[in-house]
Image (cartoon, rainbow, N blue to C red):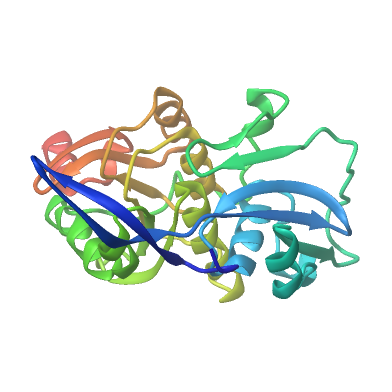
């Protein structure tokens, strides 16, 4: 597979009952990416190539390594594409922190290994996941109409062009309070898609993302809830189920968490006060 391709074509055997035929299929690209700080490895993630700098910036923000765009002085690619093609070496991004950035201690135990399926794994403890949020969302004035939420998945699918070709990518879509699509990123890893959105917002000077909604094309894990919280997003909506720890974190943080969003049907697991219909019933 060519280095840093979002998709690749493979010859496959297609079976349909008793019918068999060879055909070419387009599949989502997946390659390793190592993020380093000052030459010291910080994280290894399996991702879909594209928007890699946004991915690195978003990861540093959502994991609490940096708190301001000014904390990052530069990012450079270490492995040239031609070298990777010859040797099979994965892509490497090396981040240089600015003098005013929080000190980075490579011996501090913050070792990350991320995969396209489960997100960040192997951290020292659950306490390491619960990084203190820079922005609080509890008092965010965002209110959400169920009809607006019901329309978001269709808007995500309309924008997911690579998914239409491969069926293999997760999407993270950022919407404003009126339901307008602000940013969409895709990746084989749902956590990477979230980091790419946050990295884009950091580069555009939009953090914190007050009164915004982020939509996950799959389930809502604790990690995705943490990433939304770290970006100051008050509402996380998922097509599929949330985990118990995601619900607990959202409830503690005052974040709205919606799952199983299927047309007009949805489950509100936390932050019920932001849903217009629920708020009307509650105050009646």
Can the viewer see residue 208 in this picture? no
Looking at the rendering, in which quadrant would you find the C terminus?
A: top left
User: Residue 241: image x %, image y %?
Assistant: 29, 33
Residue at the spot 48% in from the left edge and 33% down from the top edge: 222
Identify the residue shown where x is 88% and y is 57%: 39
Q: Could you say which quadrant of the image residue 36 lies in?
A: bottom right
Q: Nearer the viewer, residue 90 or 21?
A: 21
Q: Choose between 31 and 75: the one closer to the eye.
A: 31
**Relative to the observer, which residue lies in front, 60 or 85?**
85
Residue under the point 68% across and 67% down: 85
Counting from the top left corner in percent of width and height, residue 275 is at 22, 45
x, y percentage for residue 146?
Answer: 15, 50
Q: Residue at x 73, y 25 (%)?
A: 124
Identify whether 53 is placed above or below 60. Answer: below
Place residue 73 in its image quadrant: bottom right
- Left or right of 162 in this view: 121: right
> 77 above or below 269?
below
Q: How many marks?
A: 0
- In the rendered structure, the answer to whether residue 256 lies left or right of residue 107 reads left
Q: Residue 159 lies in what quarter of the image? A: bottom left
On the question of residue 129 being in view, the answer is: yes
Q: Nearer the viewer, residue 187 or 242?
A: 187
- Relative image position of residue 229 (x, y in whole percent): 51, 46
Q: Is residue 161 above or below residue 153?
A: below
């Amino acid at each position: 597979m060519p280095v840093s391709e979002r998709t690749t074509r493979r010859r496959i055997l297609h079976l349909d009952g008793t019918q068999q035929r060879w055909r070419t299929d387009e599949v989502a690209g997946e390659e390793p990416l190592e993020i380093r700080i000052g030459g010291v490895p910080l994280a290894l993630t399996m991702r879909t190539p594209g928007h890699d700098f946004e991915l690195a910036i978003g990861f540093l923000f959502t994991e609490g390594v940096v708190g301001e765009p000014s904390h990052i002085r530069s990012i450079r690619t270490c492995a040239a594409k031609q070298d990777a093609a010859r040797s099979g070496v994965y892509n490497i991004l090396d981040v240089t922190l600015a003098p005013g950035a929080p000190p980075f201690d490579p011996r501090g135990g913050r070792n990350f290994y991320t995969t396209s399926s489960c997100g960040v794994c192997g951290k020292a403890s659950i306490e390491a996941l619960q990084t203190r949020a820079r922005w609080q969302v509890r008092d965010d004035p965002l209110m959400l109409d169920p009809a607006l939420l019901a329309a978001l998945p269709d808007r995500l699918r309309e924008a997911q062009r690579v998914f239409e070709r491969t069926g293999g990518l997760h999407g993270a879509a950022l919407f404003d309070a009126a339901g307008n699509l602000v940013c969409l990123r895709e990746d084989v890893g749902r956590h990477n898609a979230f980091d790419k959105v946050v990295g884009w917002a950091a580069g555009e000077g939009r953090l914190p993302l007050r009164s915004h909604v982020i939509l996950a094309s799959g389930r809502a894990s604790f990690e995705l809830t943490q990433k939304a919280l770290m970006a100051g997003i008050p509402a996380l909506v998922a097509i599929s189920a949330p985990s118990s720890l995601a619900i607990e974190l959202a409830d503690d943080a005052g974040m709205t968490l919606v799952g199983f969003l299927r047309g007009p049907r949805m489950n509100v697991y936390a932050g019920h006060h932001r849903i217009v219909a629920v708020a009307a019933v509650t105050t009646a």
